[in-house]
Image: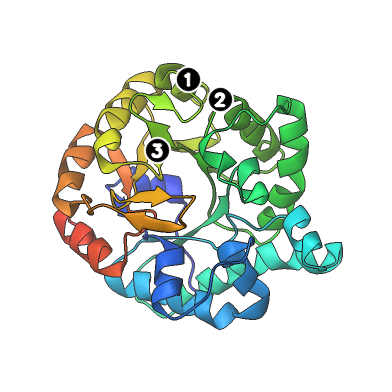
Amino acid sequence: MKPVRALAAALAEGPLVLDGGLSNQLEAQGCDLSDDLWSARLLADGPEQIEAAHAAYVRAGADVLITSSYQATFEGFARRGVSRSQAAALPARSVELARVAADGVPREVWVAASLGPYGAVLADGSEYRGRYGLTVRELADFHRPRIKALAAARPDALALETVPDTDEAEALLAAAGDTELPVWLSYTVAGEHTRAGQDLVRAFALAAGNDQVIAVGVNCCDPADADRAVELAVRETGKPVVVYPNSGEQWNAAAGHWYGGATFDPARARAWQSAGARLIGGCCRVGPDRIAELAVAIGGR
């Protein structure tokens, strides 16, 4: 396995291209993700599919791969009859699969271990609402074992992503503080507020004085909402910004399908880059073709 520089050092030199939506690429490969575990199910049932999806984004020009551990929780695996010892090995496998996909290219590729919010384990859409009725301490206790399992695999960073409210952000940062790994903090937003309705100024301020946080920003949101969020994140934290919105299509939870047209425009990333974004990619429904266009738009390596 080839050595790579620290991710924070690479960010200082210019923008890096994130990958796109893992789930849509897995579906394009013929995978069924209707299970409550979503893409995490394939860590046990189809790891070769996850590796192939990562490889598709590497070929598209992604500099950073986000692992398939977003929905990988001890509680979720327990419902499928997976023992705790077996479940502990699966998050590490997510890091290993991304490493293997990145190892065959002649450039540096980093691996960020995904930590999704508490609501993801509920599989009822509550990760887009937040406010689960749990305290910050209870949320931190939930996330800590997952973080420990992922940290043991030594990813280049932890991606604290799709965070719907400031309580969960505080909990994730506290739990991640038990490790020495750098992290990025990424909220899911609507307009200038978190999905729970909190002002983004306050939300971003949580990361301002935290040296472990190497980037802060937004993901899994409308591309239009990313514009102002990038500006606010730079202003409130002075840190590099991470931004990876959805395609712009809308999800109908009741019907179980996407609707509307895609508005993700790779050319828009130039404005995010100019405003201070250093980790730029796509989330749900943004595939390798779009990431390849984005890499060209921002001068990716």
Q: Provide residue 165's location: percent of width, then percent of height.
A: 54, 28
Could you tell me if the residues under marks 1 and 2 are in contact, i.e. CB atoms within 8 Å?
yes
Q: Amino acid at mark 3?
A: Val
Secondary structure beneath label 3 = strand
**Closer to us: mark 1 or mark 2?**
1
Q: Provide residue 5's location: percent of width, then percent of height.
A: 44, 56
Residue 98 higher or lower than 6, as above or below: below
**Residue sitting nearer the eye, 278 or 217:** 217
Q: Which residue position is annotated with label 3?
A: 218
Q: Which residue position is annotated with label 1?
A: 198
Residue 98 higher or lower than 48, as above or below: above
Residue drawn at (51%, 38%) of the image: 128
Whichever of callouts 3 and 2 sits on the residue coming sooner in the sequence is 2
Q: Give me the C-alpha separation between circle 1 and circle 2.
A: 8 Å
Q: Which residue position is annotated with label 2?
A: 166
Q: Amino acid at mark 1?
A: Gln
Residue drawn at (52%, 22%) of the image: 206
Please, which colouring scheme is shown?
A: rainbow
